[in-house]
Amino acid sequence: MSRYLLLALIVSALLLSACSGSSKRVMPADELSDSQDGASVSTVWSSNAGRGIHSVGDGLDPLIEDGRVWVADRRGELTAWDLESGDRVWRKRLGKPVSGGPALADDLLVVGTREGELIALDRETEEERWRSKLSSEIVSVPAISGDAVVVLSGDGRLVAMSRESGSRRWSYDRSMPPLTLRGTSNPKLLGSTVLAGLPNGRLVAVNLGDGSEAWQVDVGVATGSSDLDRMRDVDGDPVIAGSQVYVVGYQGQAMALDLQQGRVEWARDLSSFSGLDVDSERVYVTEANGRVWALDRRSGAAIWRQDELEGIRGTAPVVVGDMVVLGDDRGRLTVLDSSDGAILARVRIDRSNGISRNPVVVDDDVVVLTDGGRLQRLRLSRGGDD
């Protein structure tokens, strides 16, 4: 069996299992009507930003930097769009199948390809500075800090490259399970520490200078008799808030950990491949079966659970003021009340393509990139259409 199990197959099997084990009726996604009773979602601008992703699991996230939205598509077209007007202001065609990025620092723009190449461009001249070959396709967004570019390849290798030359500085490599979800979490940099969720179900903290391990934690314990039952994966990005890091794994747990030592402060059994977000009081998680949870940030106790989205594949919930926003595989954006999980608005923004990349927050707006390449800035406000 292939090392990389397609996400869609996993999700389908999981949803069928969840539906058969529940006595309540799960609402088919097409029966969920659009509404804007408690909040309004209006379009600030909408643009066609290329051909979108190749398949679910690609790490083609929109990046907001310097008043622009930077986007890459599966054919290797890199574009930048004015954040206020939605006009295209920059474009570069690589002619390579891009699957991870873009990342930007000063004048350096970095993307990863399905062929396992990390490519760095000069943002101003559009000239290639360097390219480096890795061991597997790159489906994470690279992280840049100081003289290092850090990326997690599809086979679970965490690699740091020289920002100036692209030469390899170090590689962190651990054994991987027979089956994983397609996709990886994006490595996060905090000072001299790299945090990464791995396909073996672990969260690791690695020293940026030399790649040595500071600590690692299992995000759930593998059980069961088959490779599928035992599969653990961390595809959602770890979220750093204060002195804690929050993470959730597929067929694993949602956890709060001490950032310095990796000590588990609380853990709750939850399965998610999308990830989570936090505010000052709560941790919001999209479960693998589509339900959305709010947990107490201090204890992990459940505060509310939104069941109406069960059976839909959603992105991670994203906090926007006193609301929580997520996209789904039917091209809808759903807005929840962060205090009780009530649905305030549900709007289909793409009738042909789903949304697998998390919305990006800009003030009270969100920027959303659909899987087909439609890029939109949407304004959220409480009180419906008033």
Image (tube, rainbow, N blue to C red):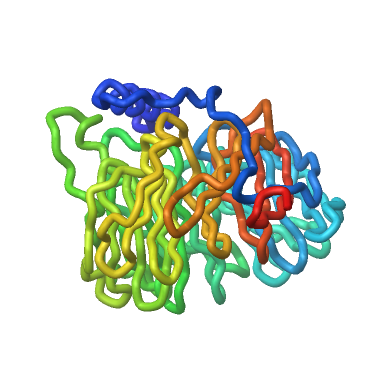
Side of 199 relative to 222 (left or right) = right
Toward the viewer: 50 or 349? 349
Outermost residue toward the front? 386
Q: Where is 365 relative to 29, above or below?
A: below
Toward the viewer: 303 or 83? 303
Residue name at image x 50 percent, y 44 percent:
315
Residue name at image x 45 percent, y 74 percent:
190
The picture quadrant where one finds residue 382 is bottom right
Q: Looking at the image, can residue 221 be seen?
A: yes
Residue name at image x 22 percent, y 64 percent:
266
Q: Looking at the image, can residue 159 be seen?
A: no
Q: Where is 178 relative to 361, above or below?
A: above
Q: Give the x, y percent position of residue 178.
A: 27, 34
Toward the viewer: 225 or 380? 380
Q: Give the x, y percent position of residue 322.
A: 53, 62
Side of 346 relative to 288 (left or right) = right
Side of 340 relative to 374 (left or right) = left
Quarter of the image where the N terminus is located: top left
Q: Give the x, y percent position of residue 40.
A: 68, 49
Side of 116 relative to 385 (left or right) = left
Toward the viewer: 361 or 106? 361
Q: Give the x, y percent position of residue 97.
A: 64, 37
The picture quadrant where one finds residue 320 is bottom right
